[in-house]
Amino acid sequence: MTDILPNTIRRLYTDPGEYIDSDHPAVQQFAEAAVRADASEREKASVLYKAVRDGIRYNPYVSMRVAETFRASSVLAAGQGYCVGKAALYAAACRVHGIPARVGFADVKNHLTTEKLRQSMGTDIFTWHGFTEVYVDGAWRKATPTFNDTLCAKVGVAPLDFDGHNDALLHPFDGAGRTYMQYVNDRGTYHDVPAKFLMREMARDYANMQGEDLAGRDMEREAAEG
């Protein structure tokens, strides 16, 4: 398919950002080591997605008060992150290979979160859930690398796969056919993570969690404990 993305727009989504910092040496090394140099863009998008999905553990118990929570290179160094940080890292890894990428946001209703997380949040609505859009085969493709494979096994769902072409958003059902995740409000797409704005939004939306000591809390361990 002919690439119809204008060059000025392409540069906006392939150049490094402050939080999608694809020029960081560690991000570049991670992206280059994950895929074959001669792979197609579709193959690279798929392989990089899996590298971020499973290589970085999902954990929502991160501080929303610090900018590094949203920065791709910092998430890579930590080896864990929540949806926005993982989306930023996936976008950065794609940009290393010249694949246009951006972050998107939506409010998501989560019907099967852990009870401990639900109590901390005070709601089952995840506002400003982050995902990634990559420009492959002449169109923007949506993919969310949020839940790693070992966490999925503990909550009873198959890992979400992305073939580099068909959209891969969050699971609508769990392994037993029960409603799992539902997108309820589209927040749009951004060329970089609006971190300062998100820090303010998270403080308002999850005021219950602001006073909690989140150190040592781990989503995967809580899921295993039931």
Image (cartoon, rainbow, N blue to C red):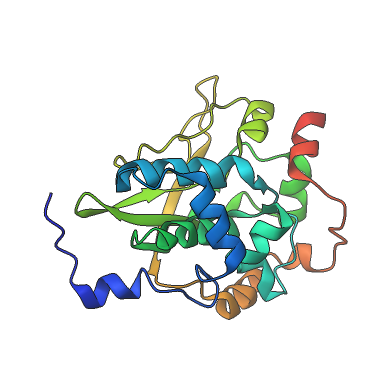
> Considering depth in this image, is 211 or 95 the residue closer to the camera?
95
Which residue occupies 40% across, 41% down?
Answer: 46
Count of labels in the image: 0
Q: Residue furthest left?
A: 2
State the quadrant of the C terminus. top right
Which residue occupies 18% across, 71% down?
Answer: 6
Residue 35 x %, y %: 45, 44
- In this rendering, the answer to whether 24 lies above or below 80 is below
> Considering depth in this image, is 183 or 68 the residue closer to the camera?
68
Instruction: Kindly indicate the quadrant of the structure image that contains residue 133.
Output: bottom left
Which residue occupies 62% across, 44% down?
Answer: 55
- In this rendering, the answer to whether 105 lies above or below 123 is below
Instruction: Kindly indicate the quadrant of the structure image that contains residue 161.
Output: top left
> Considering depth in this image, is 97 or 104 the residue closer to the camera?
97
Q: Is residue 149 left or right of residue 118?
A: left
Q: Is residue 46 left or right of residue 198?
A: left
Residue 214 x %, y %: 84, 58
Residue 48 x %, y %: 47, 46
> Considering depth in this image, is 40 or 83 the residue closer to the camera?
40
Q: Is residue 38 visible?
A: yes
Q: Is residue 190 left or right of residue 141?
A: right
Q: Is residue 226 visible?
A: no
Which residue occupies 70% across, 52% down?
Answer: 79
